[in-house]
Image (spheres, rainbow, N blue to C red):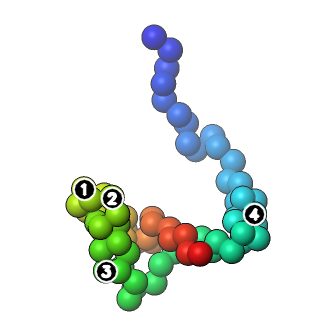
C-alpha cells in the first residue's frame, strides 16, 4: 500500500484564492472574541454538536485556528 500521508509542511502558502472570494462578496477572516459563542452556536445548529465542540477547540487555540467566511 502506498504512503497516504500528506506532508503539510511541504505545501506552499497560497492565499491568492482570497482575492477571488472577495470579488464574490465573501470575506474570509479570523473571528473576534465576541463572535465566539455566535459561531459555535451556528456550527452546532448547522452541523451538529460534534462539529461545535471541534469549533470551540479551534477557537480555544492561541492564535485561533478557526476562520469565518462572511457574505
Q: Secondary structure at mark 4?
A: helix
Whether residue 16 is situated above or below residue 29 in the rendered picture? above
Nearest the camera: 26 or 5? 26
Whether residue 62 is situated above or below residue 17 in the rendered picture? below
Image-based side of 22 in relation to 48, left or right: right
Residue 41 place in picture, x, y as percent: 30, 74
- In contact (CB < 8 Å): disc 2 and disc 1: yes
User: Which quarter of the picture shows residue 28?
Assistant: bottom right
Of the 4 image quadrants, the one containing the C terminus is bottom right
User: Which quarter of the picture shows residue 61?
Assistant: bottom left
Image-based side of 23 in relation to 49, left or right: right
Reading the chain from its start, which is encountered first: label 4 or label 3? 4
Residue at the top extreme, as displayed: 1
Report how many numbered discs are placed on residues in the image: 4
Q: Residues within 10 Å of mark 1 (few under 14, many from 20)?
A: few
Label 3 vs label 1: CA separation? 15 Å
Q: Identify the residue under disc 4.
A: 20
Of the 4 image quadrants, the one containing the N terminus is top left
Reading the chain from its start, which is encountered first: label 4 or label 2? 4
Q: Residues within 10 Å of mark 2 (few under 14, many from 20)?
A: few
Q: Secondary structure at mark 2?
A: helix
Q: Identify the residue under disc 3.
A: 37
What residue is rendered at 55% in x and 70% in y?
A: 69
Q: Identify the residue under disc 1.
A: 50
Q: Identify the residue under disc 2.
A: 47
Whether residue 14 is situated above or below residue 44 in the rendered picture? above
Amino acid at each position: 500500500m502506498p504512503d497516504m500521508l500528506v506532508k503539510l509542511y511541504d505545501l506552499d502558502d497560497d492565499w491568492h484564492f482570497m482575492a477571488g472570494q472577495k470579488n464574490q462578496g465573501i470575506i474570509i477572516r479570523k473571528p473576534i472574541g465576541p463572535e465566539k459563542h455566535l459561531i459555535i452556536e451556528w456550527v452546532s445548529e448547522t452541523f451538529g454538536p460534534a462539529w461545535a465542540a471541534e469549533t470551540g477547540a479551534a477557537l480555544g487555540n492561541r492564535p485561533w485556528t478557526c476562520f469565518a467566511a462572511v457574505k
